Amino acid sequence: MRRYTFYLSVALLAFGVGSMNGFCQRQISKEDYYQSFRAASKQRFETSRREISQLKDYKDGELINTTEAVDEYLIPDKYHRTSTRIFNDRIEKSEFISINKTYYCRKNDADWEQSSKGCIFGSGSGGPSNIVNSKYTVEEAKINNQKVNLYQEYTTYKNIYSPSKDKEGLSYWQQKMWVSKDGFILREETEVGLLEPKRRYWQKTTAYEYNPKNLKIEAPIK
């Protein structure tokens, strides 16, 4: 867990991010935005990497739980995920290793168990539906003094969690993606919430490290 905490601190707390003065944000089409996203995602999936993420869930404007995770991918067929969820003054840990379609799972530092079907500890969230309006932009920015392209999507959509059954509220989906000049996603930020009154639902930040020298994934049991 020390190694996991170190990765999270370095990647999410000390990650220098900023815009470059003198370079203007310009609006682009949805097609251009997703073409860039698909190209960067393809390079990511084809490369050994470490992804360090933090997901925060909110209710009525208050933080209710936080999930911190490290996902490691060693091409072509090795994967390791360590996850810690903090909620209601409780800590829940899970760990998952996959090697050539053989799976190893454990929760809360218990003994490892081998599985033929994988490990299921949680679920993800896709993009919005019932879209009202979307805007896509790109601008030059910097991460740790490295020049990158910052792509942003801001979408409003009809809110299925409206506080009033008689009035359908609007929600927002805001996604930011920092892409290096050679086409790799270095950082992503996504925030989803209610537009009026402004209220956050959840927020996720992910930092990427490609071909890390100390990346090693092995089976925990025989």
Image (cartoon, rainbow, N blue to C red):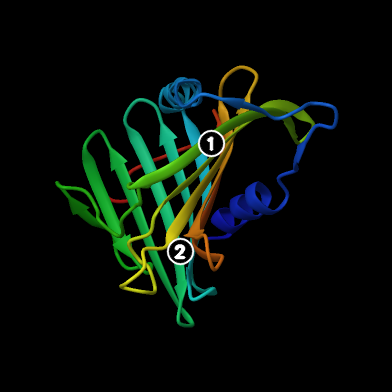
In the foreground, 162 or 66: 162
Disc 2 target residue: 84
Task: Answer above or below: position of 202 versus 75.
Answer: below
Quadrant in the picture for residue 187: top right
Disc 1 target residue: 135
**Viewer can see residue 127:** no
Look at discs 2 and 1 and give the one toward the viewer: 1
Rendered residue at 61%/17% (across/down): 182
Q: In this image, 152 relative to 13: left or right?
A: left
Image x and y of residue 59, in percent: 46, 74
Quadrant in the picture for residue 210: top right
User: In the image, what residue type sits under mark 1?
Assistant: Lys
Task: Answer above or below: position of 32 versus 115.
Answer: above
Image x and y of residue 173, in percent: 48, 49
Crowd tier of the residue under label 2, counting other residues whose Cα lies within 10 Å: few below 14, some 14–19, many 20 or above: some
The extreme right residue here reads 22
Rendered residue at 55%/32% (across/down): 136
Counting residues from the start of the chain, the first of labels 2 and 1 encountered is: 2
Crowd tier of the residue under label 1, counting other residues whose Cα lies within 10 Å: few below 14, some 14–19, many 20 or above: some
Quadrant in the picture for residue 145: top right
